[in-house]
Image (cartoon, grey):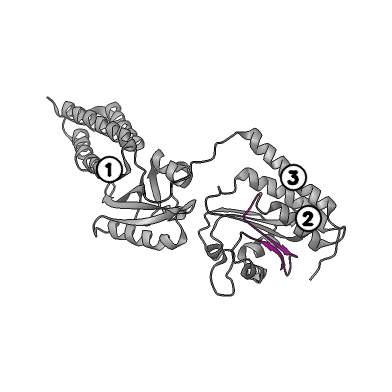
Amino acid sequence: MSRAEDFGAELVDFVRRVAELRSARSVPAADLATVLDAALFELGHAVDRLWPAYEDLVNGGRRSGPPADREEQRLLRAIFRRLPLPVALVDRETALRRMNPAAADLTGIRAGFATGRPLTGILRHADRVAFRSQTAAVARGDGDRSVVVHLQHSPGLPVRATLTALRPGADSRTAVLVVLQPSVTGEQRPLPAPDLGEATRHAAEVDLADALTTALLTAPAGDRRAVVEQAAAVLHGRLADWVIVDDGAARPYRTTVLGPPGAPVAEVAAQDPAACPLVVEAARGGVPALQVRPEDPDAFGRDATGAPVLVRAEVTSLLCVPLSVGTEGPVEGVLTLFRRGARPPFSLAEARAVDVLSRHLALALRRGPRTG
């Protein structure tokens, strides 16, 4: 039997074993650790045996030719994608290089959107430093290891991240393979809400616009504070976990803060908006900001204790929108919305809807003098 035939037979056996692992997801919880060990062994087999054998075929005297090369590469990519365990490939800085569909389902992000971004962005702030440190240690050759982390969209579910070093292909840089395994003893990961389509999203936007318009029309004419409070009450809970309104542009001052029960609302209300870079930028430049899993914890400043507001508020997504009638008109104030926990991040469609609603709120504020 030729080397190519040997390689093909070994690949067929490998694919069969991967299919068996895929079907093993239904085993009892107590046996999942054994399944994980078997999956890691198969990944090591692919890296240590299959890939060198493939390179030997390509670079040896009997070359299989470009079409066969592409076919083998497609097969290896298919194996990576069909692994039943969530697997990601990152560099020493945790920047994502590849992610299989199982990992995308677990983390709630699309692989194409996340590629090149730090994988730490999906983790809670408290776990990011530890994950970066362990990844760097594995990349520099200090040995494989694992660390328990928590995802931002499901903070109550512990996830064990197993890290191992590998050097894919002819790449001179060491990469780190990350296998994510949710804890079977923690709370069950909530299933994603069903997507009911564009019609449902449009209906929700119409309902929100109707509720806000009603609040603006029924607020006392000329009373800016009442207008802001009624509008904030509509947005709070229905659209965001936090609603923060700062009046004015040249020297903004905080007028309204609504947050979740038990949240540090008083500390955020006492904060000076001039110390919030996002608010200052929106007030002066009139440009809205949409951030998902904010990388800079100081983007919304710090509270009186010196803690970053985004960390204390457990923010996973934010919208910061100037209250202006148009791009040429004056800025009446700044509206900031926070989401946290398992709530999905603000979408581009929601950002567009909030931009429209902010213009309506700016028109209502123009009817009364500034207070405070």
Q: Which mark is residue 314?
A: none
Which residue: 29% across, 35% down? Answer: 21
Judge by depth and name the residue closer to the eye, 365 or 106: 106
Find residue 18 and report its horizontal and vertical position in percent: 28, 34
The residue that mark 2 highlights is 362
Task: Indicate whether residue 252 is drawn in magenta.
Answer: yes
Indicate the quadrant where residue 199 lies.
Answer: top right
The image shows residue 356 at horizontal and vertical percentages of 73, 47
Is there any visible trace of residue 87 in the rendered image? Answer: yes
> How far is the residue under mark 3 from the one under mark 2?
14 Å
Instruction: Tell me what residue is drawn at x 58 percent, y 68 percent.
Output: 301
- Is residue 326 shown to the viewer in this render? no
User: Is the residue marked by circle 1 packed among few (<14), some (14-19), or many (20+) residues within 10 Å?
Assistant: few
Which residue position holds label 3? 209
Amino acid type, residue under disc 2 in the picture: Ala
In the drawing, does residue 262 fall left or right of residue 33?
right
- Residue 168 placement (x, y as % from top left): 28, 45
Q: Which residues are magenta?
A: 239-259
Image point (37%, 62%), residue name: 130
Task: Give coordinates of residue 93: x percent, y percent.
Answer: 38, 57
Q: What residue would you read off at disc 1?
A: 31
Residue sitting at the far bottom: 305
Q: Earlier in the sequence, mark 1 or mark 3?
A: 1
* Quadrant, the N terminus: top left
- 312 sits to left or right of 96: right
